[in-house]
Image (cartoon, grey):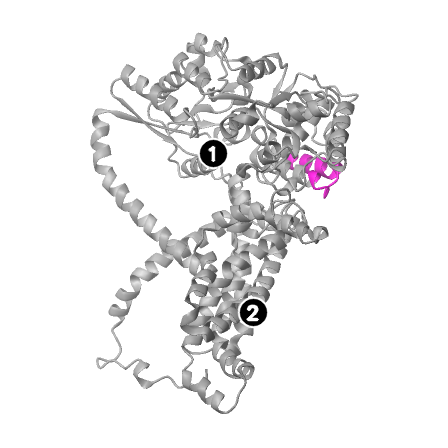
Amino acid sequence: MSFIKLPMVLMPKRSRLGRPSALVSATFLAPAIALLGLFLLYPLISSFRLSTLDWNGLGATERFIGAQNWIHLAHDPAFFKAVRNNLILAVFSVLIQMPIALTLAVMLDKAGRGSRTLKILYFLPLLMSSVAIGVVFKNVYDPNFGPLNAALNALGFGNLAQDWLGDGRFALGATLAVICWQNIPFYMILFMAGLSSLSPELREAARLDGASPWRIFWHIELPHLQGTLRTGVLLAVIGSLRYFDLIFVMTGGGPDGASELMATYMYRTVFSSFQLGYGSTIASAMFLIVLVVASVTLTLTRRFETQI
Amino acid sequence: MNGIVSIFNYRRTLAIACAALSTGLGALGPVSIAAAQTKTLTEWDSQTVGAGPKIINDAAARFEKANPGFKVESSHVLNDAYKTKLKIAFGANQPPCVFSSWGGGPLREYVKSNQVVDLTPYLQQNPSFQSRFLDTAWPAATFDNKVWAIPAENTSVAVVFYNKEIFDKYKLTPPKTWDELLHVISVLKANNIAPFALANKNKWTGSMYYMYLVDRIGGSDVVRRAVMRAPGGSFADPAFVEAGTRLQELVKAGAFAQGFNGLDYDIGASRRLLYSGRAAMELIGSWEASTVKAENPAFYSKLDYFPFPTVPGGKGNPNDVIGTVGDNFYSISKACPDPQAAFKLIESMTDDQSMRERVADTRIPPVKNLEVSDPMLKRFLKTVSDAPAVQLWYDQELPPALGELHKNTTQALFGLTMTPQEAAQQMEAEAKKDLN
C-alpha cells in the first residue's frame, strides 16, 4: 500500500535502553522455539528418517532401505494422480473461492449494518465440522434419494443428474464444490477485514469526484485489498495441497483413486496398509511440494506485497 | 479457512498434549502405589454396541473375584478408531495386556513384530477349553502352526438378503445358479427395481461379490494356495480373472443400484435402498439382520436370505461361505507382565455364561452346542456349520498392503476402470512382494 501512510503513532518506538541483550531475546524466544522444535522440526526430521525405512511401525522390525521408498514414489502412478488432484484442487480453489468471497465481502461492506443477518448466514458453513458437512453432502449427492438429482429431474434437467460421488469423472468436482462452499466464508471475512481498514474519506472523495461504484472498486478497493488477496491465494494454495477432511469423509479418495489426494493416500498407506516407511515418504514429498509451491507463489506475488 | 483451521488444530494439539502430560504425571503417583497391592491388567476391545461392553465388564468382574489381587481396566473403542489406537499403542511399545483383533493379516503383523504371546502352550494345558470352540474358528488365528488368539464374539458370513415381498410380487425364487441370478436381475430391471443395493465407497462391501465369485469358480483352495505361495498358487490364477469378468458382467447387466461406487455403507445408504423397495437384494454380512431388526422392525419381517449362487463350470462347493467364525479374537501382548493371569481373563471372557449372554445379544459365538431360539440366527448357524470351508474376508486375511490393494482393484473393477487381467496382475505383483 503505497499511498496510505501509516500514522506515526503505530510505528514502533526505539527503546531507550537500546538493543535488548541477547539473553533477554533468547528468553523470550525460547518457548516458541522449543515448541516449534518439538512439534514441527522434530516430526519433520523424523519423517524424513522414517522415509528411509521399510517398517510397519510395530516393534523392532524396521529395515533400512535407503532411497528405495523414494524411487518407488517416483514411479508410483497413484501418487502422481494424487498430486494432480491436489493441483486441480489448488487452482480451482483460488479461481472459485477468491472471486466469490471478494464479491460477497464488497457487497456486505456496502450494505453496512443492515447485512448482519446475511453475514452470519454466510459465515455458518465455516463453523460446521467437516465431518458433519461431509455426511450432509453425501446425502445431497445421493443419486437415488438426494435432493440435488431430484431437483434436476423436477426442473427438466434430468440429463444433468449424475452419479456425483460414485463416478470417477465427477467425484473430485463434486467434493471440490463442497470444499469451496465451506471455505468461501473464511476468505469473505478476510476481505471484509481488509475493506474495513480502507479509510472512508478515500471512497467519499472518489464519489465526490464522480467515480462510479465500479470504478471505485477497480481503482480504490481492489488495490487496497491486493495484500489481503495475496494472503488469501497463498492460504488457499497451501490449504489445498494439504487438504484431507472432506475428501476423506465423502469419497475416501475413490472411486479408484479419482479423488485421491496426497494426504488421503498417506493416511491409507500408514493406517490401512501398515506401511509407515512409505507413508512417511509420501508425507515428506508432500512437505517438499508444499514448500516449493508456496515459495514460488510467494515469489510470483511479491509485487502485491504490502506492509501491515 | 485452511490457515485458521490449522492454527486451531495446532493449538488444540498443544492443549491436548499439555493436558495429557499433566494427567500423565498426576496419574503416576496413585497407580504406582496401587501396583504394590494389586496388579492391573489392561484390556482393549472394539465392543461398543448392544450388550457387548457389559458382557466383557461382567466377565472381567468374575475374573477379579476369582483372582484376588488383580484389577482389569477395560476400554471399549469403536471399530476404525480402535484399529488406529491399537496400532499406535503397539508402535509406541505400550500395548494393552489383552487386546481384540479380527485375526488374519493385521494380527499377523503384530505377531511378526514379536509382540504377541503364543497361546499354544496354554491351550495344550487345557484341551477341554480349546475343544469347546468350532474347528472353523481357529484358522484365522493360527499362523506357523501356533495359535495366537482365542475366537470369542460372533460369527458373520456374507449372504444375499432379499425382500420377500418383491420376490413374491414378480414370482421370483431365490436363484441357485448364475443363469437364475441373471434372470432375477433382468426381471427386476424390467420392473424398474435395482437388483442389488451396494454401498461401495467402503470397498469391503463390493469385495464380497469378488470373494464369492472366486470361491464358486475356483473353489476354496485357490486363495489359500495363492496366499501360501504354494506351487501353482497365484493371484493371477484364471479363477481370479474370471471372477473379475463375472463381476463386470453383473455391473454391465445393471445389477447394482445407481451410484453404488460412491454410496457409503456407514450412513446406511444401501439399507435405505432396500427399505424403500428401490432395490431387492443385498450381499452383506449376516450382522445386517440384527441391524435391520433394530433399525426397521417392520421391514425385518420381509427380509430373508439365500446363499451366493453357483457359477457354471465352477469348482467351488455351493455351501462354502465367506466370512468369519470368531469375529473378534482375543490375544495377549508380550508387554503384559503376567500372561498367565491374562489368559485366565480371556477364559473368563469366553466362559459359558458370557457365551450365553452373547447369544441373548443376537450373536453367534464360535462355540459348539449353542442353544439359539431366533429363527434367522438358527439358519445362520446351520449355514455356517454346513459350510465345508469358511473363507475369511480377504482384507482381513491378507497382509494389510495386499488387502488394501485388493479393495482398490475391486472398486476399480466395479467402476469398469480396470480390466480383470490388470487387477489380477497387480495383485500378484504385490503378493510377490508381501508374501514371503
Horizontal and vertical percent position of residue A305: 48, 77
| In-image side of A172 versus B89 (left or right) | right
Is the residue B424 above or below the residue B149 in the image?
below
Confirm whether residue A76 shows in the render: no
What's the amino acid at mark 2? Pro
Q: Report the label total.
A: 2
Residue at horizontal 64 percent and vertical 32 percent from the top: B277
Q: CA distance from mark 1 to mark 2?
A: 42 Å
- Identify the subunit bearing mark 2: A
Where does residue B110 sit, x and y in percent of width and height? 48, 31
Q: Which residues are magenta?
A: B413-433
Residue lying at 41% horizontally and 66% vertically, measured from the top left: A116
Crowding around mark 2 (Cα neighbors within 10 Å: few <14, some 14 to 19, many 20+) is some
Q: Is residue B219 left or right of residue B132?
A: right
Q: Is residue B427 left or right of residue A230?
A: right
Q: Is residue B330 above or below residue A307?
A: above
Residue sitting nearer the eye, B216 or A215: A215
Residue that badge 2 annotates: A99
Q: Is residue B385 above or below residue A36?
A: above
Q: Nearer the viewer, residue B160 or B398?
A: B160
Residue B421 among those drawn in magenta: yes
Which amino acid type is shown beneath numbered disc 1?
A: Asn
Q: Quadrant of residue B292?
A: top right
Q: Which residue is mark 1?
A: B79
